Amino acid sequence: GQQLNQSPQSMFIQEGEDVSMNCTSSSIFNTWLWYKQEPGEGPVLLIALYKAGELTSNGRLTAQFGITRKDSFLNISASIPSDVGIYFCAGQLTQFYFGTGTSLTVIP
Amino acid sequence: EAEVAQSPRYKITEKSQAVAFWCDPISGHATLYWYRQILGQGPELLVQFQDESVVDDSQLPKDRFSAERLKGVDSTLKIQPAELGDSAMYLCASSQNSRTQYFGPGTRLLVL
């Protein structure tokens, strides 16, 4: 299957700090999705991106579809404790392929 | 807000037993997916349905796994016999346009 590399693997930040994470692949994708997953629950869709260069926001979250179509970025501004979780990217060819996740811990 | 429903939420079984998971997608969503997520990893596709037809089951271990969506609405994923390595979270997702997916809460399976 396709390999999507997410970085960083984990982050420990202070409440109020901004967060940046990214997802890269050797393949060109048509769609990028970003999800957040909390322990014991299913992933929750945060942002969907459909065009190269597209920049989309959802509250304090902003994601971008990379120009090369091989990468995507997610930023969280002014982090709060409830942002804690694992963030997954997913890129679509004929099916969706998921990254290995970025674990975010927010220290109050 | 419409959600994907899954049951049971948790299942403990002994190896060699049969288990079944149920999924009810968001109303009107023609595409349904079953994923397996091993702890510490991202979800991996097992099978994709478009209405009642299988679109992709290339990663479904067909010697022990089966999936059906007889009326094109809800779906069942079965494992028989279960093996220790099947312990994982089984996630169902649905989509209206095949470009966005919404996940259910998952079924956590533990095989002893």
Image: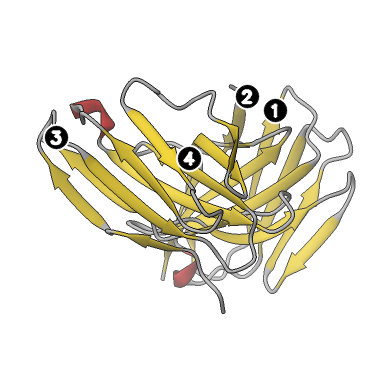
Chain containing the residue with disc 1: A
Q: Is residue B88 above or below residue A104?
A: above
Q: Label 3: which residue?
A: B17
Residue at the extreme front: B71
Tell me whether circle 1 and circle 2 mark residues in contact (CB < 8 Å). yes
* Relative vertical location of residue A96 with respect to residue B104 in this rendering, above or below: above
Callouts 4 and 1 close, C-beta under 8 Å: no
Q: State left or right for residue A108 relative to residue A21.
A: left
Question: Residue under mark 4: which chain is it in?
Answer: B
Front of the two marks 2 and 3: 3
Which residue occupies 80% across, 29% down? A28
Amino acid type at circle 2 is: Gln
Q: Which residue is mark 1?
A: A25
Q: Are marks 4 and 1 on the same chain?
A: no
Dot 3: within a 10 Å radius of its alpha carbon, few (fewer than 14), some, or many (20 or more) residues? few
Alpha-carbon span between mark 4 and mark 3 = 24 Å
Which label was assigned to residue B43? 4
User: What distance separates the C-alpha of mark 2 from that of mark 3?
Assistant: 32 Å
Residue bearing the label numbered 2: A2
Label 3, secondary structure: give it.
Answer: loop
For mark 4, give the secondary structure: loop
Residue A56 image offset from top left, x and y in percent = 80, 61
Mark 4, residues whose alpha carbon is within 10 Å: few (<14), some, or many (≥20)?
many
Task: Name the amino acid, label 3.
Answer: Gln
Residues at marks 1 and 2, CA–CA distance in whole angstroms: 8 Å
Same-chain status of marks 4 and 2? no
Residue located 53% across and 29% down the image: B57
Of mark 1 and mark 2, the one earlier in the sequence is: 2
User: In terms of secondary structure, where does tag 2 sit?
Assistant: loop
Q: Which residue shows up at 41% across the image and 71% down it?
A: A108
Which mark's residue is nearer the viewer, 1 or 2?
2
Checking the image for residue B65, the label placed there is none
